[in-house]
Amino acid sequence: MNMGNHMALTGGRIAVALTAIALGLSTFMVGMAMALFAVLPMLLSVRAGRLIDAIGVRRPMKVGAAMTFAGCALPCAWNSRPALLLAAVLVGTGFMMCQVATQNHLGNAEAGQRLRNFSLLSLMQAVSGFGGPLLTGLAIDHLGYRYAFGLLALPPLLSLWGVHLLRRRLARPPPPLPGSPTLAPPRVRDLVAIAPLRRVLLANMTLSGAWDTHLFIVPIFGVSIGLSATTIGVVLSCFAAATFVVRLLLPVIQRYLAPWKLVTVAMFMASASFLLYPLFDTVAMLMAMSFLLGLALGSCQPSLLALLHQHSPPGRAAEAAGIRMALINTTQMSVPMAFGALGAAVGLAPLFWAYSLILLSSAWRTRKLAFAPRPDHRE
């Protein structure tokens, strides 16, 4: 079910960016439009997590899928700047609710099953991450911008139907027992104070920022060197194809690389990809850089999600997932705004190199965790 909402999100970002460029918006305004995907999720994801801990996942999933559908359908009916902005808000917020609920539902399992659940979720999102940009690029070139949004509205509609079919399995959790610690007023700082959980959140934020930087810069970079919407979609789909490939291989990779070693290697690989990206303008090399980046970033999510649930206190796993989403959406909002303003002033190549340095410094810090034989970092 979450696969359809993720396809709408990944395709919707590309559709909003390319439609905004076609409507004559500046790089800064495109960045503002992309940031709106993250504003409400950044502010509301922790509260959404607490709500899901309290009432279960079914109703948040239903509301989230409905919002995602409405966000994609709106620009199809009314292709204008206000519609694009509202679509970004609806799709981003709807996906956030579905994502937190899905992660909480899959995380309520034993440690071994939890990692398999998150590996399967990541694999499915790799498929939707491939299909969303490719479908969007083809639809824009051959049908137009409005019909591209119309096609993107179909997957969340199917997700909404899936939630209805599984309504009995998505049961409400039992209420906490009297005197349970979960009845105490929840505080975010209590979760952030847990050192292993804090390290997972910071690493996830850095890697997610790399993911969103790529999705934001590549469409603008592609337009600047004369690529069509279909070609840009193909380049971005190579990234998603790499995430699919690496997640198929994760059961083997995880036998040899502990979670923090995997994260550190991924950060070094992603840093190299961002460093080399703007040095090429041929489609083949851009596809190769996109694929390399997808291998790096796609390898980490299942382990980080499993570690997140492993180190979350009982009854607060969805809230911890909400904090993760808040941090992710902070980068999704700040990166397009900051890089949009900087891109208009200094060009696009320095933006690639700036995030390459961020990843390199993060990898240098996490190398100590990667080679420290501490049992709390293992699944």
Image: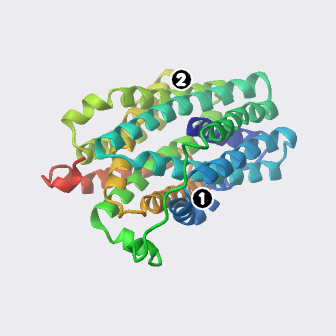
Q: Earlier in the sequence, mark 2 or mark 1?
A: 1
Question: Pointer 1: what residue?
Answer: 41
Identified at 35% across, 48% down, the residue is 306
Name the residue nearer the viewer: 54 or 196. 54
The answer to whether residue 350 is visible is no
- Residue ranking furthest to the left: 373
Query: Residue 52's x, y, as percent?
Result: 54, 59
Tell me if residue 326 comes above or below residue 25 in the rendering. Answer: below
Identified at 73% across, 36% down, the residue is 153
Element on which disc 2 rests: helix
- In the figure, residue 106 lies in which quadrant? top left
Query: Residue 195's x, y, as percent?
Result: 28, 66
Depth check, mark 2 against mark 1: the one in front is 1
Identified at 43% across, 61% down, the residue is 320
Question: Pointer 2: what residue?
Answer: 283
Label 1 neighbour load within 10 Å: few <14, some 14-19, many 20+ = many
Which mark identifies residue 117? none
Tell me if residue 356 comes above or below residue 188 in the rendering. Answer: above
Element on which disc 1 rests: helix
Name the residue nearer the viewer: 145 or 108. 108
The answer to whether residue 186 is visible is yes
Asked whether, in this view, residue 290 is left or right of residue 85, the answer is left
Colour approach in the figure: rainbow
Query: Residue 278's x, y, as percent?
Result: 48, 37
Name the residue nearer the viewer: 164 or 25. 164
Give the residue type that dot 2 points to: Val
Query: Residue 322's x, y, as percent?
Result: 50, 60
In 3D space, how far apart are the residues under numbered discs 2 and 1 (Cα atoms)?
34 Å
